[in-house]
Every structure is written in structure tokens, then in C-alpha cells.
Amino acid sequence: MAFKDFPRQAQGVQLLQRSLEHGRLGHAYLFSGPRLEQLESLAATLAKTLNCQQPARKGRAPVDCCDTCLSCQKIEHGNHADVHWVRPESKTRTITIEQVRSLMQEVNLKPAEAEYKVATIVAADRLNIQAGNAFLKTLEEPPARSILILITTEPQRLLETITSRCLRLSFGGEGPVELAPQQIAWLRTFGDLAASSQRSLLGRYRLADVLLTKLNEAKQAVEEALTARSPLQRYKDAEKDLIERWEEELKAAIEGEYRRQRFDLLLLLQWWLRDVWLSTLGKASGTRNETKGASLLSFPELPGTQALAQRLSPKEAAENLRIMDDLQRQLATNVQEALALEVGLLKLHL
């Protein structure tokens, strides 16, 4: 991908391109946004642009990559000698001091074939304290013609000593998030079932089954997509230590991306439950405010919203939002996923 392929991140991309144009690129960046995969693509695109053999230029300065030359293709496929990636290890889902030391050793070597060495730390919020402290000196004074990029979906979890040494760019995207038709269809199914289940225990377990089935499908899709992109698929004859490292990184990447997608799915349910709450407020205040309340709904087309709102009080609907907040916090720990989801759904007022 090239910078032109990120229209929803135009503001952050323009800031990067302006720095490239004026030769004022920073030595360390912190990219934040809602999706790690997208942030990785942006980091790779910056690495391509810096080392592209046929870049798009503004004046004499390269401001975008061609995405087709040999250098761009090596970076795209993760086998460029001067572009390095560090990801959390699988057992602890942290970035260790050993990984950071190995990265610093690579960065301090002269470029093998490119103009710039680029090192990206994926999910930088997973740096443990020892690794973060070991990285500070390199982060503050990296070698000449090297760029360090930290990417995270949770910048608030990074050490202040790290964030203060980086130029921060947010790639949250402009405008409302557009949901895919299949997401709306799934939410409609869940909402209709929730509205019809009333207070029966069987209905709650049906809801849990719908949710767990969706999450299992998501995890399988994540495993297939990330496994296909892993260097394990391209370099089966690599050294044993390298294969083991790639296996660990793949497991961690799958777990991290699945957790992110699970968070997004539950957040989608939370937005729908917010619609239910808003509808109960309109019901409680009379028909005069119902039209105004409808304009605030995220999914006004879903019939289950009003059906559920008719039998809930505003207090019960608000309690549902608190239950979903608690569920998200629990899932961020080492709690058993299926049990936490089951208990959370049983607590909901339906």
C-alpha cells in the first residue's frame, strides 16, 4: 500500500508527507489508532517511501512510494534487510528486554541495501518496564539515517518517558465508522433474539451461543489471515531459532488481533444497548421527544431496539451499559472468556 491508499487517515498522512517534503522527518514516531493492522501498514508505507527506488516526489523530496519496485516489495513481504519488526511474545504477550537489545544491535549496524534503517515496535504498550528503560537511550539518540516507529492502540499504557521522546501521530480516521453489511446483519440477528427472549434462561443461552459462534468465526479468520502473511509460509528452511521466534510472534499476533476484534464486537453490542437506553428515555419523557431521540440512534433501522426498550426502564437500560463496561474490563485480564461472556449475558436486563 501507498500513502494514497489511506484516505480516512489523510490528516496524519499529510503531516508525515509535509515532514518528508521539508526534510524534517523525526527520528522516532508513535503511531496510534484503533487497528494495529492498519498502523502496521502505515509504518511499512513510511519505510517504503524512505527507501523506494521510484518514489512519487514533491520537488526533489519523496512523499509516497511506488509500491511496485524491488525495495517496496521486499518491505511488503517482510524480507528487507534494513526494515525490522518487533512484536510481543506469545506466553506473556510482552516485548522483552532481549527483543529490544536484539533490535538495538540491528539498528546500530550500517544499512545493508537501503538509505534508511526502519524499526517498528508493534503493540508498543506491551513493552515491559525493563525493555522500555533499555530502549530509552536508542529512542532519544538513534543512529543516523534510522527511523524508529512505535505503534499502539492504547497509547495511555506507554511509559511517559517513552511517549515524551516520540512525535505522536493519531490515525483514528475521519468521519463515522462504516459497518460492513454482514456486521449489521449479525447485530440484527442478535437484537431480534434479545428482544424476543424476554427473561427466559434458554433465551440467554441462545444469545451466548450466537455471540460465541461469531467470536469463534473471527478467531479462525484471524488465524488464517495472519498465518498466510507469516514468514513461516515463505521460509520453511530458515534456521531453527528464527522459526521458533516467528512461531512465537505469530501466536502473539493472533491473540492480540483476536482480542481487538472481540473488543470491537462487544463495543458494537454496547452501542446497540445505548440505542435501547436512548429509546427508553424517549418513552419515559413522552412521544414529544421520541423523534429527537431517534436522531441520536446509531442503528435506527433495527426493530429489536424499540421492542426491547418497551419493556425496560431507563434505569435497567443504563445498568446494561455498566454491565458491558465491566465485561470488557474482565476480558482484559486472564479471566476465562466463555465463562465471563456467559455471566455477563445472564446479568443483562432483557
Image (cartoon, rainbow, N blue to C red):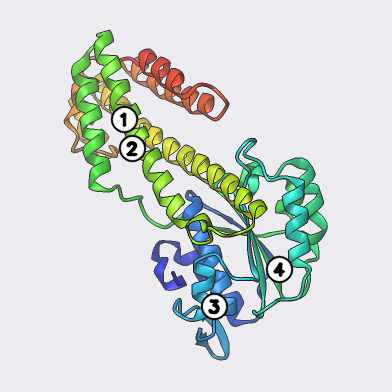
- In the rendered image, residue 234, in percent from the top left (x then y), is placed at 49, 61
Q: Residues within 10 Å of mark 4 (few under 14, many from 20)?
A: many
Residue at far bottom of view = 60
Question: Tag 1 or tag 4, which sits nearer the N-term?
Answer: 4
- Distance (Cα) linking label 4 and label 3: 21 Å
Tell me, yes or no, if residue 88 can be seen here: yes
Residue at 39 percent of width and 66 percent of height? 7
Q: Residues within 10 Å of mark 3 (few under 14, many from 20)?
A: many
- Which amino acid is tagged 4? His
Residue under pointer 3: 71
Residue under pointer 1: 213
- Which amino acid is tagged 2? Glu
Question: Tag 3 or tag 4, which sits nearer the N-term?
Answer: 4
- Distance (Cα) linking label 2 and label 1: 6 Å
Residue under pointer 2: 217
- Which amino acid is tagged 1? Thr
Which of the image's four quarters has the N terminus?
Answer: bottom left
Q: Are marks 2 and 1 in contact (CB under 8 Å)?
A: yes
- In the rendered image, residue 228, in percent from the top left (x then y), is placed at 43, 54
Residue at 60 percent of width and 45 percent of height? 248
Residue under pointer 4: 27
- Which quadrant would residue 189 be assigned to in this image? top left
Q: Nearer the viewer, residue 135 or 246?
A: 246
- Distance (Cα) linking label 4 and label 1: 45 Å
- Left or right, 275 with respect to 121, comes to left
- Which amino acid is tagged 3? Ser
The residue tagged with tag 4: helix, strand or loop? Answer: loop
Question: Tag 3 or tag 1, which sits nearer the N-term?
Answer: 3
